[in-house]
Image: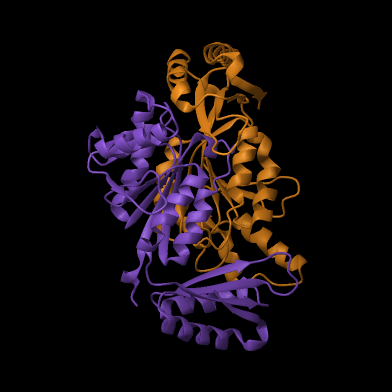
Chain colours: A purple, B orange
Amino acid sequence: VTEQSTRTAAIVVIGDEILAGRTADSNTPFLLSELRELGVDVRRILVVPDVIEDIVEAIRSTQPRHDLVFTSGGIGPTHDDVTMAAIARAMGRPLVRHARLVQLIEDLYEALGKKASEVHLRMAEVPEGTELVEAEGLRIPLLVLENIYILPGIPELFREKFLAIRERFRSAPFHVVRLFCKRGEGHLAPLMSHLVEEHPGLRVGSYPVLDDPGYRVQVILESKDRALLERACEALRARIGEEAIVRVERR
Amino acid sequence: VTEQSTRTAAIVVIGDEILAGRTADSNTPFLLSELRELGVDVRRILVVPDVIEDIVEAIRSTQPRHDLVFTSGGIGPTHDDVTMAAIARAMGRPLVRHARLVQLIEDLYEALGKKASEVHLRMAEVPEGTELVEAEGLRIPLLVLENIYILPGIPELFREKFLAIRERFRSAPFHVVRLFCKRGEGHLAPLMSHLVEEHPGLRVGSYPVLDDPGYRVQVILESKDRALLERACEALRARIGEEAIVRVERR
């Protein structure tokens, strides 16, 4: 397993209600947890308001540099739903009315005994080239433009759409070892620096706790290469000394 | 009250543990809620890994365009604490050892019966020009460089430091009215578009719910100008029709 087998991702969350602290963003924690489990490396999260220029900038700063970009929110039929227009502009594509989407929206309203209005059909306007990914259980398919997965902000729909296609993102898994140490960061810092230098491809994080009488710092070692991780773990345990390690957890 | 009386803010969260979904970011929801209450308009949130280049870019993309920037995390003494080096680079300043911070760190360890090591004193290295903001109850002052407030990632310390100086951020309050409507977005969309055009300085958000039998859409009107807000609210209520409004809430 090499670093190259990792797929990177960025998450772009769109919504005044999140920035105003009115609505807790539950989509991001859900997606972080899912993507981690799938072996995808999320490298950036951006939260921007319902403003075209801000969304354009968010897409332009993430789309070319990550394997996957997930957007959340701003795809309804109202004046504050500007995600489609912004993605179209960011990607240099016109906004077009997608015939298959028009049909699906009309069918959906007909099934409810209603007629889709021009307002509802605004939701069929997407950047030219947008693909519809149909999957079992989805009434409306997922919209994908190149590497941008365009998801709705409503948490129930966000989850439904993501879960319908989650397996397509599966990559090599991350392996993790956690060492709970009685020594402080002052002691551990040079040992960790040395470890990182010796083991390219290893990530080492250090998380002090204030109020736990049992340990002072949790050191997390992480890699997609299990053999590398185990060698690094052995080396660090020997340097810290077993008497200073309260416990070791894997994952 | 004009739009100009609003102070804008960006939040930059630094930490692999957040992006890995291992640690829930509680600092951002806390800060969003606090800043909202203080009348500060948060316009962007960025979450980046413990990588200097990513933090530099996050600072460069937010610092010149917002009145306030708050960073969270990456200011401890270990190899993965690179926030200070990144802010220094982003702002074109050298990293210097701050004499007063050295003294404070030495005093802190002495009070614990220990001696501050070179590793601990690494935490006294800050971008040249960084101010120490002392406040009641803070053992270590808050670090501020121009409009960048550099906060620790540990939630207890993050809160302690922010709360010690929160009043300095107070601005004119936001006023909010929420209308809970029985009509769907298809009906409401043109009314809201019209309202936004008529009332510059008004923000209108529309939030459909899937599973509430009592109402279908929450419309949120918001402004710093209370008179404008009330005029807009009157106009929208008249157009929607009182029979379609389940209830009205303020804030």
Q: Is residue A219 left or right of residue A42?
A: right
Q: B219 and A139: which one is in front?
A: A139
Where residue B167 sits: x, y (%)? 68, 35
The structure residue drawn at horizontal position 56% and vertical position 26%, both measured from the top left corner, is B220
The structure residue drawn at horizontal position 71% and vertical position 45%, both measured from the top left corner, is B135
Q: Is residue A57 visible?
A: yes
- Placement of the N terminus of chain A among the 4 image quadrants: bottom left
Q: Is residue B128 visible?
A: no
User: Picture quarter containing residue A98?
Assistant: top left
User: Picture quarter containing residue B94?
Assistant: bottom left
Q: B216 and B9: which one is in front?
A: B216
User: Picture quarter containing residue B211?
Assistant: top right
Where residue A105 sits: x, y (%)? 36, 35
Where residue B233 sits: x, y (%)? 57, 15
- Placement of the C terminus of chain A among the 4 image quadrants: bottom right
Q: A127 and A248: which one is in front?
A: A127
Where residue B73 sits: x, y (%)? 56, 56
Q: Is residue A40 left or right of residue A92?
A: right
The structure residue drawn at horizontal position 58% and vertical position 19%, both measured from the top left corner, is B244
The structure residue drawn at horizontal position 63% and vertical position 88%, both measured from the top left corner, is A242
In the displayed structure, B245 sits above or below A45; it is above
How many badges with numbers are in the image?
0
In the displayed structure, B61 sits above or below A162; it is above
